[in-house]
Amino acid sequence: MALNENWFTEICAEGGSAFSLELKDKIHEERTPFQLLEIYETRHFGTLMTLDGLIMLTDRDNFIYHEMITHPALFSHPDPKRVLIIGGGDCGSLREVLKHGGVELAEQVEIDEQVTRAAEKYFPELCESNNDPRARFRFTDGIRWVAAADPASYDVIIIDSTDPIGPAAGLFSEPFYGACRRALTAEGILMAQSESPLFHLNILKRMHAAMRETGFHDITTLHFPQCSYPSGWWSTTMACKHATPQGLRQTAARQRPFSTRYYNAAVHAAAAVLPQSIAEALAKQ
Amino acid sequence: MALNENWFTEICAEGGSAFSLELKDKIHEERTPFQLLEIYETRHFGTLMTLDGLIMLTDRDNFIYHEMITHPALFSHPDPKRVLIIGGGDCGSLREVLKHGGVELAEQVEIDEQVTRAAEKYFPELCESNNDPRARFRFTDGIRWVAAADPASYDVIIIDSTDPIGPAAGLFSEPFYGACRRALTAEGILMAQSESPLFHLNILKRMHAAMRETGFHDITTLHFPQCSYPSGWWSTTMACKHATPQGLRQTAARQRPFSTRYYNAAVHAAAAVLPQSIAEALAKQ
């Protein structure tokens, strides 16, 4: 069946697949200094943001990604106070981070200020904590920011980036992981979005290798459904600076004083159980 | 971006979404007595089978579904010998069932013989156990078959059906679950495909309620990614006739003498951990 002009379609060339959302309207289009930013109202997915024609997030399913790129790291660090988010311009990760009462600073370093301005206007729910006094916004290059950071200045660094093509490629590289390691405290945790286990297993393998080479320990991939990303299956990967990290704070995760829609302590552990063939592929390196 | 005629597209109206696969060729088209059956060669998903324009399976990702609708049930029953598969005409579930050495009979009741004939021709891998002397093929109506079955004649019944619209609607109903319960042995297990947790939570809730009303116990939904089904996120739901079932045979699942690509004992347990909001929705009934 053919889709008419009332649909937004994202083709994933390497997957030989495409995902489409039925639209009501395009409500914003803007060429920022970095990319083409478009906002749509969809029929059943609420508001949709795309960058250069690729789906960044929808109202309906962004909760899974945002919860799974933040809480596993924050509940694995023994006492996260200073958190750095690289990318994450839609502010959804920032909101989740700020749900943790112990966090004293949540710094978001997004290269494209217009993404955050659009999120404030079109995704107000994700931006509800933007005025929290613990939030800091830096609209600059994440790689340079981390390179210039004082050593041991962050407890958690979250790489909430686009795909490893174009401007975000450097965010998947060994030198960048090295800079992150230096900027992390002794028990620091690095967390990064790590693409689709079905379509991008090679990227995932390279990330594991690069994190290990950089000196990170206990490299853990968590997987979860993500309807609007290629293959509908996505992952985040977490790595520890300390050689013998303490792991998930079970009680804190179970008794968290805030609500979640996907994450809980049991889901955290379950998401880290990899399917047989993915576990074999990552172990074989 | 628009898709040209080299793509197969399935629209999910209730989701407001669509999934497309890039094609090389259509290699078969047939109007069976029951439905329109088409087979395509895709660019990156191998062979694709559709029924009435809906994706049934692809070479690339069917392993997840077939493993997750069979092994969790067979490793939860203490000693499954007689297994009934309702639907499952592509023979992928049959193949997984026959990997269990203790199984003495695997009976596949598919209403549309042409689906199995096409699978034999275009999905030979899935049909590699069709000549196993333990396999039986019945091309007839599954609801009638179960109604006519002797009481306590099967250890496991697997409902490997299409969506609960049209001919398969009856397979999601309380009377049918009642007939299955009667046809199951005392420690019998019912396993059914149970749609998308994102798009079809109401169907999932109704299934749980209907299975409970019918007298089943320990109703467990397992969730997993399934790229080529709507939302990319799918589930199977398992229910026990016995009030105090013994649960997963850990050692047997861990030491299984056959290979799997998705399933293992840890994945079994992890897939049954439901995301916070899904767990809440199913508990609230």
Image (spheres, coloured by chain):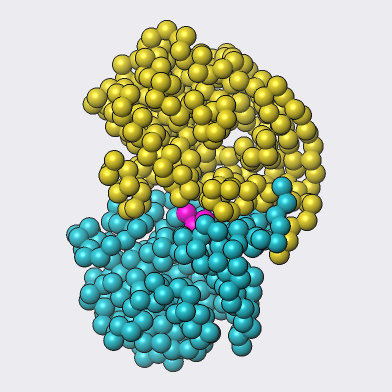
Chain colours: A cyan, B yellow
Residue at 39 percent of width and 34 percent of height? B207
Residue at 29 percent of width and 32 percent of height? B218
Residue at 47 percent of width and 54 percent of height? A225
Q: Where is residue A248 in the image (x, y as percent from the top left)?
A: 27, 61
Residue A251 in sight in this render? yes
Side of B127 where B42 appears, left or right: right
Looking at the image, how many numbered discs can be counted on the residues? 0
Residue B78 in sight in this render? no
| A165 within the magenta span | no
Q: Residue furthest front?
A: A24
Q: Is residue B182 above or below residue B167?
A: above
Task: Locate residue A268: give its quadrant.
Answer: bottom left
Residue at 44 percent of width and 55 percent of height? A224
The residue nearer to you, when weighing B30 against A87, is B30
Side of B203 where B232 appears, left or right: right
| A227 within the magenta span | yes
Q: Position of residue A228 (x, y in %)?
A: 54, 59
The magenta segment:
A225-229
Q: Where is residue A142 in the image (x, y as percent from the top left)?
A: 49, 84
Side of B215 where A232 appears, left or right: right
Q: Magenta region's main secondary structure? A: loop
The residue nearer to you, when weighing B82 against B89, is B89
Q: Is residue B179 above or below residue B75?
A: above
